[in-house]
Structures are given as structure tokens and as C-alpha cells.
Image (cartoon, rainbow, N blue to C red):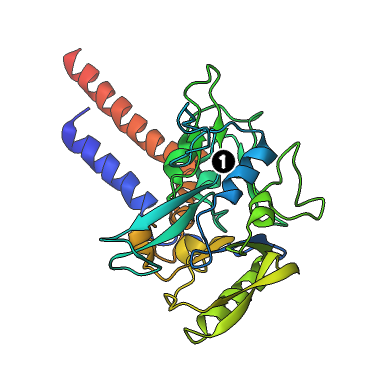
């Protein structure tokens, strides 16, 4: 095949694939009508890690970094044995809580249960699934092939692969609603919300959690507010505390299409390690392009057929010239 003809055929195919209306991004997915989730308020967190201990109890996971001199769990980050962890932000002397300079605060890491989850979008075998009713994102090991695409597709670095397991396995927070646990389907709250003594982790319907978050941001710093604990639909005795100077932002309301687990903080979220995300979800762009281009493999087949025709035509011409 002549190089000039190849480029002409390839350019023609590219023109078809890139024609207006052929490859378009789809809209972000909308939150599930009855979506449930959690609101984590770092200003209420005291770093007790009761949520971490309860999570391990519910999921039957071992403590990490335990030694003779420290007979307690010292999980430093998410791992196959830790689905929920409390991390610490520190600056300078770190002597004042919830202050950026010379201060400190706590931050929780667990699955954000995205409204438009990247892990679900990139999974080739539907081992990652988003419940259409609750919005909970779960992993199904019986379908998983261990490709670890979900680890790449998650902007929060949540899915963790167990490299010490000869058969491999992905682990992530299932919002206490996986096989053998099913707390949410039984009308219970998540283990971490149940164990939290201050209401820093609050469970409930996403709509109500958003209302509660907006209510807190509208309060005046210094006012005493009764913070609900446990399940927002049926709260336990409230925890009273002076209102901090919140960052006027609800992380997860809109980031990358939104999440069902949302965060409040008095310290900027970029200092807490949250990734820089816009409102558009990555799957809404990638799926729109990929699903259009490869719908029934029609367009790639057209391009391949065109290239094949050019190759055969030129091959025939060359043979004719030689005979």
C-alpha cells in the first residue's frame, strides 16, 4: 500500500469518526431518587477512630501495624484490611484545631459512592455496580477478573487490591450493604455512623444530608448548634458544640457529578488531599465518546473495510504491473 493512499484512507475514516454528532459526551448521571449516604463533618471529629474499629468489626478485618509496643490498630491509609481511615492535617505548631496555620484537623477516607462512578464505568465485567435505588456502589468479587481498572478510574484512590492474596481481590467500602452484611437493606445505619460519638459521620438520605450541610454553612461561627448523631432520619441525642468558621463548600455536592458521601471542613479541601475536580464526571465524557465510536463496532468496521479495500486495490495494481 502506498503511504499517500494509506493517509488518505485513514484521514477519511477519522473524518467520519469525528463528524459532529457522532461522538458526544453524555450528561452526568443524576443521584438515585432514594440515594443514601453520609455527611462527614471534620470539625466534629475528635480522631478517636471508633469508626475505623467498628468498620473492621462489621467487615471482619484485622488490625494493622500492631506490635508488642503498640497493641492497637495503626492503619495509616486505605488498604485491603482498612476500608475507612482517619487521617490528620497538621501545620506548624498544630496547636489549634480546625485552623489552617499552626493548626490541625481530621479527615476521613472511605469510598465516596459517586453519583456517576468512574470505577463502574471502567469495569469491563460489571464487578463494580451502582445500585439504581440507593446509589450505593458495590464490588462483586464473583464477577471480578482482577484487572484493577477500577483503581485507575477512581479519583479518590479508594479501591485497594490485595497483592498478598494469591487469587487477588479488590476491597472497598460497600456502605455496609454487601453480601453477609446488608445493614442498610435491614433498615440499619452504617457501622461508622453508629459508632461515632460526636456525629462527625452522619448517615441518612442524600437529600436530607444536603439540607443539613447547607443549614450548618448558614450558621454564624460561635453559635451553639445541636448536631444530630447516627441516622439523620432518626437521630440520636444531639451533640452540642459551637459552630466553627466553615469553608463555604460542601465537598461532594457537585464534584465530578456529585457523591453520596459528602464532607464539611474548616480547612480548605485541597490541604486535606482532595483531588482537583470539576463538576463534569469523567465517565460522562469517556463513555459518550467510546460508546458512540464502538457502538456495535460499526464505525471501526467501516474504517477497517476502507483500509482493506485500498490495500487490496493497490496490491492488485502492483501485480498487474509486474505480469
Number of marks: 1
- Considering depth in this image, is 248 or 17 the residue closer to the camera? 248
- Residue carrying label 1: 172
The residue furthest right is 186
Location of the N terminus (image quadrant): top left
Viewer-proximal residue, 283 or 314? 283
- Residue drawn at point x = 34 percent, y = 45 percent: 13
Q: Label 1: few (<14), some or many (≥20) within 10 Å?
A: many
Query: Residue 88 location, x and y as percent?
Result: 40, 54
**Residue 303: image x %, image y %?**
38, 39
Residue at (43% x, 41% y) in the render: 76
> What is the x, y in percent for residue 135?
65, 56
Residue visible at 49% across and 36% down in the picture = 79
In the depicted structure, whether residue 163 falls above or below residue 256 = above
Dividing the image into 4 quarters, which one contains the C terminus? Answer: top left
Q: Secondary structure at mark 1?
A: loop
Q: Position of residue 298 (x, y in %)?
A: 50, 41
Q: Is residue 30 above or below residue 121?
A: below
Amino acid at each position: 500500500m502506498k503511504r499517500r493512499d494509506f493517509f488518505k484512507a485513514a484521514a477519511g475514516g477519522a473524518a467520519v469518526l469525528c463528524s459532529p454528532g457522532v461522538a458526544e459526551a453524555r450528561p452526568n448521571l443524576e443521584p438515585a431518587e432514594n440515594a443514601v449516604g453520609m455527611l462527614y463533618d471534620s470539625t466534629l471529629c475528635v480522631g478517636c477512630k471508633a469508626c475505623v474499629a467498628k468498620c473492621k468489626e462489621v467487615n471482619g478485618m484485622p488490625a494493622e501495624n500492631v506490635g508488642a509496643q503498640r497493641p492497637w490498630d495503626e492503619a495509616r491509609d486505605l488498604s485491603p484490611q482498612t476500608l475507612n481511615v482517619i487521617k490528620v492535617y497538621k501545620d506548624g505548631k498544630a496547636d489549634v484545631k480546625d485552623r489552617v496555620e499552626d493548626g490541625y484537623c481530621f479527615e476521613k477516607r472511605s469510598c465516596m459512592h459517586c453519583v456517576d462512578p468512574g470505577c463502574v464505568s471502567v469495569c469491563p465485567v460489571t464487578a463494580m455496580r451502582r445500585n439504581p435505588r440507593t446509589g450505593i456502589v458495590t464490588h462483586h468479587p464473583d464477577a471480578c477478573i482482577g484487572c484493577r481498572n477500577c483503581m485507575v478510574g477512581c479519583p479518590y484512590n479508594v479501591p485497594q487490591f490485595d497483592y498478598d492474596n494469591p487469587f487477588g481481590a479488590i476491597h472497598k467500602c460497600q456502605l455496609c450493604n454487601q453480601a453477609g452484611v446488608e445493614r442498610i437493606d435491614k433498615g440499619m445505619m452504617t457501622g461508622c455512623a453508629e459508632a461515632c460519638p460526636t456525629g462527625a459521620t452522619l448517615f441518612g438520605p442524600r437529600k436530607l444530608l444536603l439540607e443539613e450541610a447547607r443549614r450548618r454553612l448558614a450558621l454564624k461561627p460561635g453559635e451553639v448548634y445541636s448536631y444530630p448523631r447516627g441516622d439523620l432520619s432518626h437521630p440520636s441525642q444531639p451533640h452540642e458544640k459551637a459552630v466553627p468558621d466553615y469553608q463555604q463548600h460542601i465537598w461532594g455536592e457537585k464534584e465530578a457529578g456529585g457523591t453520596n458521601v459528602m464532607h464539611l471542613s474548616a480547612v480548605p479541601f485541597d490541604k486535606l488531599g482532595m483531588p482537583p475536580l470539576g463538576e463534569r464526571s469523567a465517565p460522562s465524557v469517556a463513555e459518550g465518546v467510546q460508546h458512540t465510536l464502538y457502538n456495535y463496532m460499526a464505525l471501526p468496521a467501516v474504517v477497517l473495510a476502507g483500509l482493506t479495500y485500498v490495500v487490496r486495490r493497490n496490491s492488485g495494481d502492483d501485480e498487474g504491473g509486474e505480469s
